[in-house]
Image (spheres, coloured by chain):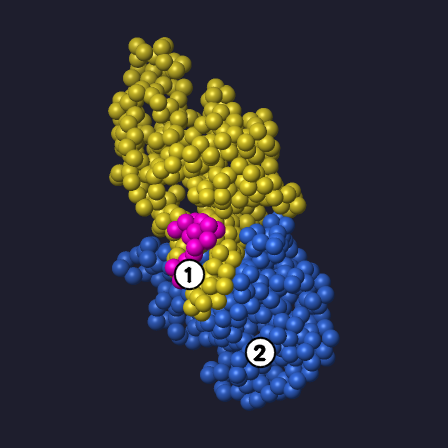
Chain colours: A yellow, B blue
């Protein structure tokens, strides 16, 4: 199993070397060619059944092992995510539709994701619902016997009209579909009454406004919904029961990005990029560099622990949260060290300039790592809850293994 | 590499934990402090009955993991005995244990023991050891200055294990410190609610657990390096040691803080753990000296991993 995963790593590196320009810093730049590179690369991966390799063969995957999936996450993130926004479709949109979708939804969406043809965005956060996601206010209003019902994509059961605002929505400018949370009823608990809708971004009633930011273009957008009409056929899972699905999505997300891999690749590359100038760095700075390498290994092993527990079906929210706390702090700490390293050297060759741009992009993007996909505070709450509850899955020792 | 110890090793660790509990548990450190000459008698026979001194961690992976689990259990009770150091004894010298030494004043927590010790420096110089008298235990935590008599330069291979096993002891102390803090915040009430209900307290516990969990995975990784006689086993050991001493600083600070003033009292185990974690954290290298040594060794090449270029060791082969 280890050998298969390492062979896959070599295969992926070969494909990246062949298809991705060396200057590539991700799909989300002001140059549309970068997005095109990513889209093309997704199709190449798809041809080799590598885009959705974790998926069952019937949906275009390879039934790949958890370790092979780990290698893909590492290699993609280490090389500035050459799948662009499609990692989301692959990592969690597809698997969630597999679990909760109707046969028609599976037919419609899964092959398109597996072929690398479609970009999804995630309509979760709102201006007043960030970490407190269940407070979302975007509302889907049901209209029974809507006269347009037979004409649209709907298949009976009335229509929904969605109004409200989402924010921080990555890739909304380029996405064809949105995985949208909206409130369909109000009960005693705010977690009840939320429904997942699968919505085409080209539908009338959707307006996307980009937000310029430190992390670069396309990452942050506002999305406005003004009486967007959807039907029963666009509902994923049960009406009002979307919170459970959302929890699953968030759990997928917590281990979805191997941030440590980019940190590790850049830190390991630093002495080579600086050449002789490495020895002129302040001793404290090289010590911080060495310390960050230890923290990279630590985060990587914590990720592997989550993967191993997933394999046994005994992973707890606290395990993923502990990894996320370690890896997001690593992301920011290593970015600081790397920025200081490049500022101490005169980097003039083409390779050196490229390294400098990579580090600079890493620093900017790392600023969001303790906020995006569940803030570090939420991770601390999840971990503390696990520690304090003392609840352990059957067959698994206490979190404190000797106790 | 498995990310966790084998079931057998974990079972052995539990067995040792119970045996040490029956032998006195938290009271062992206090008893040894009162009568330091009893150090040997309080602990060694208990572990001897479990077969601890027959373990050959340098010879078999099973014994290596069992030794690690044993050290962890000893740490849990802050056992006043150099269990890790005894288990790290080299195969080719007639000694009872091995201590790694560094810096201008060689020292180890071997006072009041009538045992034969070898010492090894990080670059493999081995010596025989005579322990000088130590200050009272409450002050010295059984650490004695050592007089060294050179033996040979063949000890490089002994060093990783000599560094790693004490980190397993320290890991056991971290396990316990967090467990004690958790238990305390669940019963202690202030402002009409349990401390555990305060988010500021929860966040501290979470941060401590991230540190502890990080040591746990690195400790297992370093053990694997010894098992494979990997060329970079010493790098792995130093990386583990750095993580362990960093974690200890943070975990003990948090454990003390969450206990408040009562945590300083002799009646509270956290006080003993904190005090007797000192030798493990300072010797043979403290946090800065460990980082210095690791940085010096890594030079331009970094730690072995998936992005360490031509060195190319595959961590995934290890992990799966």
| Magenta-span inclusion, residue A344 | yes
The residue indicated by pointer 2 is B101
Q: Which residues are magenta?
A: A342-360
From this viewpoint, is residue A319 visible? Answer: no
Secondary element at tag 1 = loop
In the image, residue A277 sits, relative to residue A232, either above or below, namely: below
Circle 2 Cα neighbour tier, 10 Å, few/some/many (<14 / 14–19 / ≥20): many
B161 shown above or below A171: below
Measured from the top left, where is residue B71 in percent x and y?
Answer: 59, 67
Same chain for mark 2 and mark 1? The answer is: no
In which chain is the residue bearing label 2?
A: B
Q: Which mark is residue A345?
A: 1
- Main SS of residues in magenta: helix
The secondary structure type at the circle numbered 2 is: loop
* Residue B186 in picture, x, y percent from top left: 39, 58
User: Which label lies toward us, 2 or 1?
Assistant: 1
Q: Is residue B69 above or below residue A349?
A: below
Of the numbered discs in the image, which one, if any, rests on residue A403?
none
- Estimate the x, y position of residue A87 in percent, counting from the top left: 47, 36
Q: In this orientation, which residue lies closer to the viewer: A37 or A124?
A: A37
Name the subunit of mark 1.
Answer: A
Residue A25 can be seen in this image:
yes
Residue that protrudes farthest toward the bottom in the picture = B133
Looking at the picture, tell me which residue is in the foreground, A83 or A163: A83
Query: Going 57% across and 43% down the picture, which residue do you hit?
Result: A13
């Amino acid at each position: 199993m280890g050998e298969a995963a390492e062979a896959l790593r070599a295969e992926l590196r070969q494909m990246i070397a062949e298809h991705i320009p060396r200057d590539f810093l991700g799909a989300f730049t002001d140059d549309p060619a970068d997005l095109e590179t990513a889209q093309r690369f997704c199709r190449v991966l798809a041809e080799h059944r590598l885009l959705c390799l974790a998926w069952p063969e019937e949906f275009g995957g390879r039934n790949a092992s958890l370790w092979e999936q780990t290698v893909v996450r590492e290699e993609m993130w280490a090389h500035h995510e050459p799948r662009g926004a499609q990692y989301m479709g692959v990592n969690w949109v597809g698997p969630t539709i597999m679990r909760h979708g109707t046969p028609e939804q599976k037919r419609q969406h899964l092959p398109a994701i597996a072929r690398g043809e479609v970009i999804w965005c995630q309509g979760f956060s709102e201006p007043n619902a960030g970490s407190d996601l269940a407070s979302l206010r975007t509302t889907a209003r049901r209209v029974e016997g809507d006269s347009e019902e037979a004409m649209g994509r709907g298949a009976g059961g009335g229509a929904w009209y969605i109004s409200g605002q989402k924010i921080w929505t990555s890739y909304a400018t380029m996405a064809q579909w949105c995985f949208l949370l909206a409130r369909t009823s109000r009960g005693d608990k705010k977690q009840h009454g939320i429904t997942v809708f699968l919505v085409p971004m080209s539908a009338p009633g959707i307006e996307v406004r980009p937000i310029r930011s430190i992390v670069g273009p396309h990452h942050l957008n506002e999305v406005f919904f003004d009486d967007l009409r959807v039907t029963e056929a666009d509902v994923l899972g049960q009406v009002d029961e979307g919170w459970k699905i959302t929890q699953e999505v968030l759990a997928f997300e917590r281990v979805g990005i191997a941030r440590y891999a980019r940190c590790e690749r850049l830190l390991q590359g630093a002495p080579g990029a600086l050449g002789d100038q490495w020895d002129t760095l302040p001793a404290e700075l090289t010590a911080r560099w060495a310390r960050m390498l230890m923290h990279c290994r630590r985060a990587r092993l914590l990720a592997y622990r989550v993967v191993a527990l997933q394999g046994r079906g005994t992973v707890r929210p606290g395990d993923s949260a502990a990894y996320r706390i370690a890896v997001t702090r690593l992301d920011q700490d290593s970015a600081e060290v790397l920025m200081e390293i490049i500022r101490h050297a005169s980097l003039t060759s083409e390779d050196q300039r490229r390294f400098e741009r990579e580090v600079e992009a890493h620093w900017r993007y790392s600023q969001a790592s303790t906020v995006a996909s569940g803030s570090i505070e939420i991770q601390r709450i999840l971990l503390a809850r696990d520690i304090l509850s003392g609840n352990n899955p059957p067959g698994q020792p206490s979190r404190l293994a000797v106790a | 590499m498995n990310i966790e110890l084998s079931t057998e090793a974990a079972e052995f660790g539990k067995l040792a934990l119970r045996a040490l509990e029956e032998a006195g548990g938290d009271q062992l450190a206090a008893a040894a402090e009162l009568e330091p000459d009893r150090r040997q008698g309080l602990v060694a026979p208990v572990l001897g009955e479990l077969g601890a001194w027959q373990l050959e961690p340098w010879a078999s992976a099973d014994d290596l993991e069992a030794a690690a689990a044993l050290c962890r259990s000893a740490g849990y009770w802050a056992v006043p005995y150099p269990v890790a150091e005894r288990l790290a004894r080299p195969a080719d010298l007639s000694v009872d244990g091995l201590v790694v030494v560094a810096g201008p004043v060689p020292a180890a927590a071997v006072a009041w023991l009538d045992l034969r010790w070898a010492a090894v420096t990080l670059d493999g110089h081995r010596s025989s050891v005579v322990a000088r008298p130590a200050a009272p235990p409450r002050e010295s935590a059984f650490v004695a200055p050592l007089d060294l008599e050179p033996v040979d330069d063949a000890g490089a291979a002994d060093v990783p294990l000599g560094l790693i096993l004490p980190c397993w002891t320290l890991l056991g102390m971290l396990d316990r410190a967090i467990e004690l803090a958790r238990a305390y915040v669940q019963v202690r009430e202030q402002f009409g609610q349990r401390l555990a209900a305060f988010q500021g307290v929860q966040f501290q516990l979470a941060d401590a657990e991230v540190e502890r969990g990080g040591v746990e995975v690195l400790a297992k990784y370093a053990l694997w390096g010894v098992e494979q006689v990997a060329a970079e086993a010493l790098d792995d050991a130093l990386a583990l040691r750095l993580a362990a001493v960093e974690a200890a600083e943070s975990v003990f600070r948090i454990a003390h803080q969450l206990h408040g003033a009562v945590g300083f009292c002799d009646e509270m185990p956290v006080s003993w753990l904190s005090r007797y974690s000192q030798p493990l954290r300072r010797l043979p290298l403290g946090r800065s000296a460990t980082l210095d040594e690791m940085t010096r060794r890594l030079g331009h090449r970094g730690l072995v991993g998936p992005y360490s270029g031509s060195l190319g060791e595959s961590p995934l082969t290890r992990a799966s």
